[in-house]
Image (cartoon, helix red, strand yellow):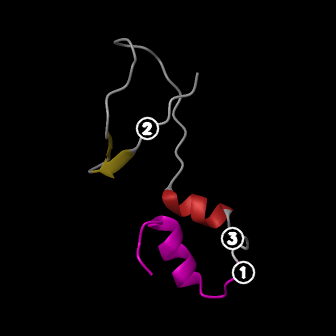
């Protein structure tokens, strides 16, 4: 079953923001999906020509415009 967790990349290491329900030494496969790649994947879905505005809203949907 897939597990999705948020992490921050710092000094060459991914630091998870919450613990994982895994056994010690359990092997896993990691897929990296960055916020920027999610913005690029939705390109053209919002009818707006201001790419800076679209990116800002996509990366921070709570922002008060």
For the residue labelled by badge 3, is the local secondary structure a helix, a strand or a loop? loop
Residue 27, given in percent of the width and then of the height, sits at: 47, 18
- Report how far apart the C-alphas of labels 2 and 1 lie in the structure: 31 Å
The stretch drawn in magenta includes residue 7: no
Q: Residues within 10 Å of mark 3 (few under 14, many from 20)?
A: few
The residue under label 3 is 43
- Report how far apart the C-alphas of labels 2 and 3 lie in the structure: 24 Å
For the residue labelled by badge 2, is the local secondary structure a helix, a strand or a loop? loop
**Foreground residue among 55 and 15:** 55
Q: What range is drawn magenta here?
A: 47-65
In the displayed structure, does residue 55 sit left or right of residue 18?
right
* Residue at left offset 52%, top offset 63%: 36
Residue 14, given in percent of the width and then of the height, sits at: 35, 42
In the displayed structure, does residue 4 sit left or right of residue 40?
left
Mark nearest the camera among 3 and 1 is 1
Q: Quadrant of the image for the N terminus? A: top right
* Residue at left offset 59%, top offset 58%: 38
Residue ranking furthest to the bottom: 49
- Report how far apart the C-alphas of labels 3 and 1 lie in the structure: 10 Å
The residue under label 1 is 47
* Residue at left offset 38%, top offset 11%: 23
* Residue at left offset 28%, top offset 51%: 10
Marks 1 and 2: in contact by CB < 8 Å? Answer: no
The residue under label 2 is 5
The stretch drawn in magenta includes residue 51: yes
Q: Quadrant of residue 65?
A: bottom left
Residue 37, given in percent of the width and then of the height, sits at: 58, 59
């Amino acid at each position: 079953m897939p597990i999705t967790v948020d992490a921050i990349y710092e000094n060459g290491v991914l630091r998870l923001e919450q613990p994982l329900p895994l056994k010690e030494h359990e092997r896993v496969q990691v897929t990296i999906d960055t916020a920027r790649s999610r913005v690029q994947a939705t390109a053209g879905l919002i009818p707006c020509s201001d790419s800076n505005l679209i990116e800002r809203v996509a990366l921070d949907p709570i922002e008060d415009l």
